[in-house]
Image: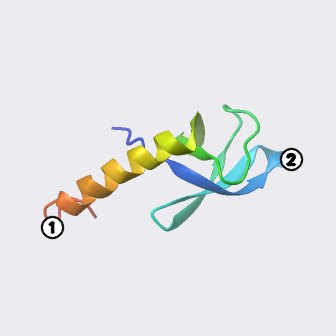
Amino acid sequence: MCLGIPGLVVDVQPESDRAVIEVFGVQREISTFLVGEVQTGEYLIVHTGYAIEKLDVEEAQIRLKLWEEILRDAYPGQVS
């Protein structure tokens, strides 16, 4: 199952088509090969280590708010 959680680009390494994204305080290095050039401050959807979609800030904020509601309402042990 794929979870579409927007990740905020916090660092870009254009020479290697890589970037670092942050999701709920967790940072991870990913490939940007499939989406082309990215900028710090953009939001990306990532699947198996590859960015697959760029999101505008407004759409990313809507999706992050929904995720926060889902996580807040989860039963203890449902989400780790």
Q: Quadrant of the N terminus?
A: top left
Q: Which mark is residue 15?
A: 2
Among all residues in the image, which is located at the extreme front?
Answer: 58
Residue kind at label 2, given as amino acid type: Glu
The residue wearing badge 1 is 76
Q: Is residue 4 left or right of residue 38?
A: left
Q: Position of residue 35 (x, y in %)?
A: 67, 32
Circle 2 SS class = helix
The residue shown at (26%, 58%) is 71
Q: Is residue 7 left or right of residue 24?
A: right
Q: Quadrant of the C terminus?
A: bottom left
In this picture the colour scheme is rainbow
Q: Is residue 5 visible?
A: no
Dot 2, crowdedness within 10 Å: few (<14), some or many (≥20)? Answer: few
Q: Which mark is residue 48?
A: none
Q: Position of residue 65 (x, y in %)?
A: 36, 52
Q: Position of residue 44 (x, y in %)?
A: 57, 43
The residue shown at (60%, 39%) is 51
CA distance for labels 2 and 1: 43 Å
The residue shown at (24%, 53%) is 70
In this rendered view, identify the residue nearer to me: 58 or 50.
Answer: 58
Q: Position of residue 40 (x, y in %)?
A: 71, 53
Dot 1, crowdedness within 10 Å: few (<14), some or many (≥20)? Answer: few
